């Protein structure tokens, strides 16, 4: 059977961004009979024994409690499972001195769905036919934003400024406020902090500037905090989460060890939360309740925040240190390579300036020496303009073992030398 697809059906059936690369990676791994690869493409977090144990313990507690039947055998409210909402309200009010009530919270099936709701509730065509943009203020950013809108022409990303430390082969992206346009034609703003793929953490000042620009036009700003404190706390530099006004603080429990359970959390003004909740009701009624019930326990007991700071963060902080140390030791100083400052998340982001081949070709060369990373050009959703930099970057997942990361970076240095040399 070959049913005709609508325009939207065709759009959504397309393998966008990193999904297309993942297909190539899966095929490479399948076809590579006998060849072993160091696969540093994963966005899936490592299963850390302490974290798995926490979720196991919460599950055992749930199974033994009278609450179990109510959790899995009944529908619930669209907004989310009340004990989880209560746990978040209490934790965030205490931790950050906020005055949240349950009207400020929405639980979604993963945070990806949250961006889908927001992109389409606030972005796209208005009733009067005006196009409201979904603005990504700092490109590159999370590849998943590329597929969230039903109106692809609404997505617009802005080229950053580059702060380069030539002596130490490091760099950092900064928003270019002279270019950034947030105005009456903006529907919403989205950015990740810490950022997937770069590990960048926008400063408080930068965030304040963006939210103030947006506030003038009543535009919601979704701060994608999938890697932020208090959980999973994958920030390696000091950062404070932002709340209030037009900010929607968006969290995910995926990197806190629960990607399979699909839990996203939005904290924002009741009017914004209500619009997102209505979208959710139409789409899926509510998020599954089993994951919410175990998350409520882990948050309420304080264990999730503790394990984030004491186990999850040190694990990845050590990995980025290995990547940095190995590249510093093995990459020729004469080559124009620049590693993005590792301020958070679970990736390293390498820029190879003036690379004689494309990032895709470099990815193919790396495969030949048994190393898989993700070509960087997939991480610029919404950035229309030609920019060579887009073809000069690689995303390296920090989910490898110490020895894998070290070996892979040594091989990468050799390939870089050959490629620039030729
Ligand atoms: C920055 C960022 N935002 C959102 C997501 C989606 O996460 P979730 O599993 O909560 O849908 C990811 C997943 O990798 C991510 O890296």
Image (cartoon, grey):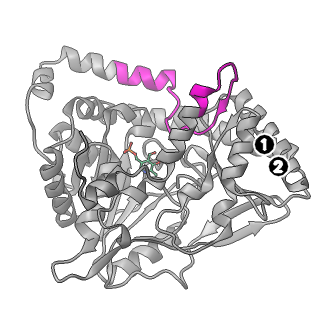
CB-based contact (under 8 Å), mark 1 and mark 2: yes
In the image, 253 versus 26, the foreground residue is: 26
> Is the C terminus in the top left, top right, bottom left or bottom right quadrant?
bottom right
Q: Position of residue 340 (x, y in %)?
A: 68, 57
- Estimate how packed mark 2 is, as few (under 14), some (14 to 19) or many (20 or more) residues with alpha carbons within 10 Å: many
For numbered disc 1, what is the local secondary structure?
Answer: helix
| Residue in the picture at 44% in, 75% down | 210
> Image check: 249 left or right of 31?
left
In the image, 374 versus 108, the foreground residue is: 374
| Residue in the picture at 32% in, 43% down | 110
Res. 305 in view:
no
Q: Position of residue 398 (x, y in %)?
A: 62, 39
> Image check: 13 left or right of 367?
left
Q: Residue furthest front?
A: 1
- Estimate how packed mark 1 is, as few (under 14), some (14 to 19) or many (20 or more) residues with alpha carbons within 10 Å: many
Q: Is residue 341 magenta?
A: no
Q: Quadrant of residue 58?
A: top left
Instruction: Write down the residue under mark 2.
Output: 416
- Look at the picture and state if 3 lies above or below 70: below
In magenta, the rendered stretch is 28-56
State the mark number for residue 300. Answer: none
- Look at the picture and state if 118 lies above or below 237: below
Res. 56 in view:
yes
> Is the N terminus in the top left, top right, bottom left or bottom right quadrant?
top left
Instruction: Write down the residue under mark 1.
Output: 412
Q: Quadrant of residue 148?
A: bottom left
Q: Is residue 37 magenta?
A: yes
Q: Position of residue 164 (x, y in %)?
A: 75, 68
> Image check: 276 left or right of 387?
left
């Amino acid at each position: 059977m070959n049913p005709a697809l609508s325009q939207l059906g065709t759009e959504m059936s397309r393998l966008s961004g990193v999904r297309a690369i993942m297909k190539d990676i899966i095929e490479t791994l399948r076809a590579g009979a006998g060849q072993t690869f160091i696969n540093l493409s994963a966005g899936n977090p490592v299963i850390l024994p302490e974290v798995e144990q926490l979720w196991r313990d919460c599950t055992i507690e749930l199974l033994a409690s009278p609450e179990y039947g109510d959790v899995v055998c009944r529908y619930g409210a669209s907004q989310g499972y009340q004990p989880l909402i209560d746990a978040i309200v209490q934790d965030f009010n205490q931790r950050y001195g906020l005055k949240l009530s349950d009207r400020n919270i929405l639980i979604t099936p993963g945070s990806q769905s949250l961006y889908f709701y927001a992109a389409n509730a606030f972005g796209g065509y208005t009733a009067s036919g005006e196009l409201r943009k979904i603005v990504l203020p700092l490109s590159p950013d999370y590849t998943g934003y590329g597929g969230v809108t039903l109106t692809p022409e609404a997505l617009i990303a802005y080229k950053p400024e580059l702060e380069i430390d030539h002596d130490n082969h490091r760099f950092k992206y900064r928003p270019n406020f002279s270019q950034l346009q947030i105005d009456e034609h903006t529907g919403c703003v989205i950015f990740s902090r810490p950022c997937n793929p770069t590990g960048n953490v926008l400063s408080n000042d930068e965030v304040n500037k963006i939210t103030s620009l947006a506030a003038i036009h009543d535009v919601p700003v979704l701060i994608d905090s999938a890697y932020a404190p208090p959980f999973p706390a994958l920030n390696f530099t000091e950062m404070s989460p932002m709340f209030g006004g037009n900010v929607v603080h968006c969290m995910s429990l995926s990197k806190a060890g629960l990607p399979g359970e699909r839990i996203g959390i939005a904290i924002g003004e009741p009017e914004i939360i209500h619009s997102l909740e209505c979208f959710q009701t139409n789409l899926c009624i509510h998020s599954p309740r089993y994951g919410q019930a175990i998350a409520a326990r882990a948050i309420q007991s304080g264990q999730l925040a503790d394990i984030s700071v004491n186990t999850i963060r040190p694990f990845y902080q050590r990995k980025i240190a290995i990547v940095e140390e190995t590249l510093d030791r093995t990459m020729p100083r004469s080559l124009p390579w620049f590693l993005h400052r590792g301020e958070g998340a679970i990736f390293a982001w390498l820029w190879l300036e003036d690379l004689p081949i494309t990032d895709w070709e470099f990815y193919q060369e790396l495969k030949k020496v048994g190393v898989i990373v993700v070509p960087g050009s997939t991480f610029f959703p919404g950035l229309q303009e030609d920019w060579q930099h887009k073809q000069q970057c690689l995303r390296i997942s920090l989910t490898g073992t110490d020895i894998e990361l070290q070996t892979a970076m040594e091989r990468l240095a050799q390939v870089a030398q050959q490629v620039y040399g030729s």
